[in-house]
Image: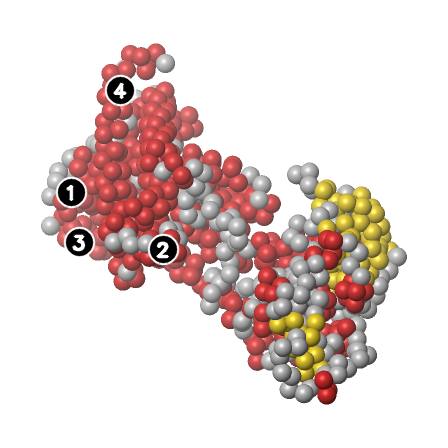
Amino acid sequence: MIEFRGVSKQFDDGTLAVDDFSLVIPSHKTVVLVGSSGCGKTTLLRMINRMVDPTSGSILIDDEDIAGLEPVKLRRRIGYVMQNSGLLPHRKVIDNVATVPLLEGVPKRDAYARAMELLDTVGLDRSLANRYPSQLSGGQQQRVGVARGLAVDPNILLMDEPFGAVDPIVRADLQQELIRLQQELGKTIVFVTHDIDEAFLLGDEVVILQVGAQIAQQGTPSEILANPTNEFVANFIGVGRGKRRLSVDGSVESNGNDLVLVDSAGHAAGVVDAPGGVIANGDSSPKSRSISNKTDQAGDA
Amino acid sequence: MLFAAALAFIFDPANLLGEKGILPRLMDHLLYTGLSLGVALLVGIPIGLIIGHTGKGKNFVIALTGSFRAIPTFGLLLFIILFTGLGLGPLVFVLAILAIPPIIAGAYSGLDAVNRETIDAARAIGMTEWQILGKVEIPLALPLILGGIRSATLQIIATATIAGYVGLTGLGRFLIEGLALHDYTLAFAGAILVAALALVADGILALIQRLVVPHGVSRGMARTTTRSGRRTAPPALTGTPITEG
Amino acid sequence: MQWLWENRDLVFGLSLEHVRLSAIPIIVGLIASIPLGWLANRFRVTRAIQLTLFGILFTIPSLAFFITLPSVLGTKILNPVNVVVALAIYAIAIMVRGAADAFASVPRDVIQSATAVGFSSVSRFWKVELPLAGPVLLANLRVVSVTTVSLLSVGALVGNGALGYLFINGYQRDFPTEVMIGIVFTLIIAVLFDQILVAIGRVLMPWAHGVRGSSRALTVGGAA
């Protein structure tokens, strides 16, 4: 469990990036911090491994105030994955994955063996182990980044827009991979993104942030979609613009099993299972919603 | 004609050894170069690494390298010797002073060119500052660090020629004696020897420089450039190998 | 100070000589480097040849150059042309590399859009490529300027060092003041030249305020 207690952060140049922020992040869940650039979400994330220290307030991991912990030791037990993978360009993939275990004094053989397993875990072929990062595609580099984040088997995994720099198809792939991984591993994941679709897809819980890291709304994706607390949230998640308010388009002949859905502006937005022309009643969890909703926000990254 | 005569002088075995021979003077030249470079490295590398790692003192580097390039080393050496008297010490002192700015600049610009994200990531996964410096920054910066050392070495070799003018020897002695005695064959032979030494040293250092380029960076599209224009650093910090002498 | 006053004509004359002898190589270096640098940036083969050739010339110590040039040029060893030619070769060596970097620093999409809006390749060179390469060219020219002014004094050993005469004369007379005055006036000329170049840059390239040039120039003479 990670707990923010009344945390503020003012940078040297005077900007108040985080203003009295409190939040409890439960263990073994994926919590997504989502907001526009400059809302302080990355600052929040970097406070968890003491890359940034708060000006006031405190942060606790399993009820222990991290202000009293040695930053380097703290960072070594927390996985960190960032946007451009942050791999060391002069080291082979295997060495990148094994970096922290080797720093911690794990024997080379064991560290390498574990790194090889991690390549399997993140869906990379073992033959890539001896390549250099520059010889990999962007998506592969991100997978290596995730593998490195998992190398010391941390309880906590911090992810700072890890899929922000790859193309939409690869991103979708990586997102699915992360969902699968999380089902296997059950880490406490704190994920930062500005993409609300990504947030709804990955988050057990989503925290929508405004400037100064003010929490606009916090809840499960369905809670937020069903009940945006204010105009800001409604606009942010697209309800205000009618993108998520879908209705059946009666003008299109259905093939008997699917109905076409349109948004409030009349643009086709998805299909819904409707055997015999009747929409099946939703017993499905948000993650397996049968409505394949496609909005243009995915392309914003 | 002159060229042939100079070559004949160089390849005459009689001129190789002996007190005024080529070999002892070459050895002296290398001694001056090695001592000065050693002193310059001891001073310059730590300063360059500190400035490069912390990012503080960039303006100092720019001012230092800019103004040092303007100082006529030949004049500075003569000036200092007039106070200290002839000797190895003053020569090494002046040559080291000359070599420190390019060494600092090379180390600084090498570290400065390392991708900030790579360093950020290294910190995020729990490397200490020393580990970041030793395992990330220095390996990635090595080609530029060596570039600075290469510049410095060539400047020292070239400028050490002046030693011949202030009562020491080295290959420059042939030049100075030749000029003083109007024996242009001798001067020309000296010029060829100094030039050859500089070219050989440059070649060796260039080779080393190529060998130390980290693997993953030389291959493929290396992403060592930083974002947001951090690379628009001031020009020509490392300076030029040509100098006095 | 008193020595300076008594010898003001000598120092003034040597300073003028210093300005004259160092200005020529700087100007020659700039003019020669533009076509050479453009070629080097444009064609891989010419780049390799030029950089190798000038890299070698650049490595040769200046005094060795001053002494060997007469037999190449057929001049007398005390002729000031030797020193000027040697310094011009250094200037070109620095500038060619710098100019190649300067042209390489012009954003590719700017060139493409200039072509797209209908510049001919000649007018594109004069109106787009050269002005945009200007800041990096200037940065390298400043290095050349400072280096040339400082190097010229070594020419005193072969009879043509302008202010370098004061070094040799002061050393032989065991008179540090004279050497110091030589150093100070050399520095004054270096600063003066630099300020003139900066001022010219400001007039010709008002948009480039704060642009300091390429990082390649950081290692001028470093990596060949």
Query: Amino acid type of disc 3?
Result: Ala
Disc nearest the viewer among 2 and 4: 2
In the rendering, at what x and y percent does residue C2 appear? 34, 11
In the rendering, at what x and y percent does residue B36 appear? 44, 43
Contact (Cβ within 8 Å) of mark 3 with mark 2 = no
Marks 4 and 1, the one that precedes in the sequence:
4
Q: Number of callouts in the render? A: 4
Contact (Cβ within 8 Å) of mark 1 with mark 3 = no
Q: Nearer the viewer, residue C199 or A210?
A: A210
In the rendering, at what x and y percent does residue A175 appear? 67, 71
Pointer 3: what residue? Answer: B8
Query: Amino acid type of disc 2?
Result: Ser
Residue drawn at the location 69% of the way across and 38% of the way down: A14
Q: Are marks 2 and 4 on the same chain?
A: yes
Q: Quadrant of residue B123?
A: bottom right
Q: Tag 2, which chain?
A: C
* Inter-mark Cα distance, 3 to 2: 60 Å
Contact (Cβ within 8 Å) of mark 4 with mark 1 = no
Query: Image height check: is B204 above or below A167?
Result: above
Query: Image height check: is A13 above or below C46?
Result: above
Residue drawn at the location 17% of the way across and 53% of the way down: B8
Q: Which numbered marker is on residue C113?
A: 2
Pointer 4: what residue? Answer: C12
For residue B67, say whether it is visible.
yes
At label 4, counting other C-alpha atoms closer than 10 Å, the crowd grade (few under 14, some 14-19, many 20 or more) is some
Query: Amino acid type of disc 4?
Result: Phe
* Inter-mark Cα distance, 4 to 1: 28 Å
Disc nearest the viewer among 2 and 1: 2
Pointer 1: what residue? Answer: C70
